[in-house]
Image (cartoon, coloured by chain):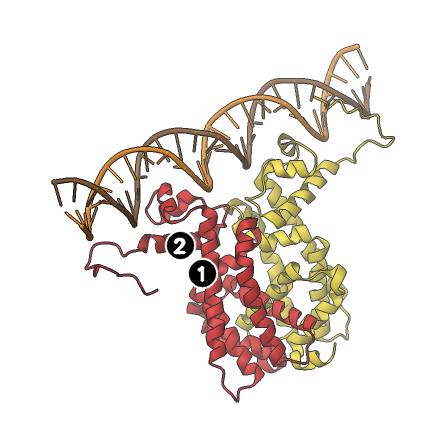
Chain colours: A red, B yellow, C orange, D brown
Amino acid sequence: MALMTSSTATSAPSPEVGDGRRRILEAAAELFQVRGYAETSIRTIAEAVDMRAASIYHHFDSKDALLTEILAIGMQAVTDAFDAAESAVEADETGAQRLQRHVAAHLDALFGHKAFTAAHVTVFPFVPAAVRVASVEDRDRYEARWTDLLGSIAPELDPSQVRVVRLSLFGVMNSTLDWFDPAAEGSLDELASAFVSTLWNGLGTVGGGN
Amino acid sequence: MALMTSSTATSAPSPEVGDGRRRILEAAAELFQVRGYAETSIRTIAEAVDMRAASIYHHFDSKDALLTEILAIGMQAVTDAFDAAESAVEADETGAQRLQRHVAAHLDALFGHKAFTAAHVTVFPFVPAAVRVASVEDRDRYEARWTDLLGSIAPELDPSQVRVVRLSLFGVMNSTLDWFDPAAEGSLDELASAFVSTLWNGLGTVGGGN
DNA sequence: GACCCTACCGAACGATCGTTAGGCTGACAA
DNA sequence: TTGTCAGCCTAACGATCGTTCGGTAGGGTC
């Protein structure tokens, strides 16, 4: 995010450079997540940032381009979180501990950039084909990271089992966007711990405990 | 012109009564699931059943009414499956066995009426408010069945834990619509068995086995 | 024959959509 | 002062949307 403020120091009144663009991205992501892509018009997005529809086109070529960038931001968030968790690996940790840090990282990224990440869960199935092909490479790359991770910590699973575990884990983690509220229900770390503990040991050992 | 269409061509020409209505429902459900609700026009639905847009309104009051009925059919399918599984309970079965039969019933209903049930997973978040309120009662009733079931077979869980388990289980089960193909990957019963076995005992005991 | 009902259609309505053309304004550079 | 440019605007374009109106065709009933 650096490299702005090239010339002036922006004392007080003037809006930050690129501020309108960022506000459009955030408002659009939020609206796409709540109302859906086709259900959200350019005029509604403009209204949310106190602009008119034509002004959106000063910052983005088209509605599809706006969605494409939103999806890219969402994938960047979870990919960065994965890599940060991977680089923080400790030598003596167990597979379950390593998995738990990645699950926590995924959940943190999901809720930390909720509007952008949720777009991948809710609106992605319905996006225009041109937008989908622009995102599929990012998504494949992220999926490959998880395939490698799960294969590494559970080498006894064959590839088709790894696939089932990965997609099931994604199903659970991504569904939390719909029903978990970190502000009201406790930390995402605890949720990640519960998920991995259940996946590893089953409910029998979790239910009595936490 | 060219629509005289001498209907004397076929020996058994008469379409079944209510056939057009059923075909519209199935085509619309399929299109809604694949393309989304707002992305699918009445004209596209009509084309899929070889009609014109105006003919849809002979069978349904509005596009929203069509969606409302599709959602109701989907909830009826899973609710009926739940009740059938419940009435097939055996006296000496364990909690895990009972849960597994219900998971299998849910998956069977999901894939057995895929277009109608998937609508609840994919398009429901974006449906117009009037359609949502018409479905929320059915959905609440189905959720209550699962809350009771899980509380019954895992009495050591408090209500908030039951909620987490239920929503996580829904997250996994409903996600299978996106990635599991019963025709190519094996039976849904096996998948249900794997889910419940993992939930109960953890991956440690499952990974080595099947 | 007359009558009705179901199923469907062509044509159009007003609304809303994404998008574009062209213009205004204020900050800044020369 | 003059020019440039980012940022935002009004107004309008054609396309597509859900929906309605006024039919027509054909089978069943009397």
Query: Residue under circle 2?
Result: A25
Instruction: Give the secondary structure at mark 2.
Output: helix
Q: Residue furthest right?
A: B11
Residue drawn at (66%, 35%) of the image: B59
Q: Determine the chain carrying the residue at label 1.
A: A
Specify the quadrant of the image occupied by residue B89.
Answer: bottom right
* Amino acid type indicated by mark 1: Ile
Specify the quadrant of the image occupied by residue A30.
Answer: bottom left
Q: Which is more toward the observer, B117 or C24?
A: C24
Q: Which is more toward the observer, B72 or A193?
A: A193
Report how far apart the C-alphas of labels 1 and 2 lie in the structure.
Answer: 10 Å
Q: Quadrant of the C terminus of chain B?
A: bottom right
Q: Which is more toward the observer, A199 or A6?
A: A6
Q: Residues within 10 Å of mark 2 (few under 14, many from 20)?
A: many
| Residue B14 in picture, x, y percent from top left | 81, 31
Q: Quadrant of the N terminus of chain B?
A: top right
> Share a chain, discs 1 and 2?
yes
Is residue B45 something one can see in this rendering? yes
Is residue A181 something one can see in this rendering? no
* Amino acid type indicated by mark 2: Leu
Q: In the rendered image of this protein, does residue B160 appear above or below residue D7?
A: below
Q: Determine the chain carrying the residue at label 2.
A: A
Residue drawn at (53%, 86%) of the image: A93
Residue drawn at (57%, 41%) of the image: B64
Q: Residues within 10 Å of mark 1 (few under 14, many from 20)?
A: some
Query: Residue under circle 1?
Result: A73
| Residue B148 in picture, x, y percent from top left | 62, 67
Residue drawn at (58%, 39%) of the image: B41
Q: Are marks 1 and 2 in contact (CB under 8 Å)?
A: yes
| Residue B147 in picture, x, y percent from top left | 60, 66
Q: In the rendered image of this protein, does residue B47 appear above or below residue B187?
A: above
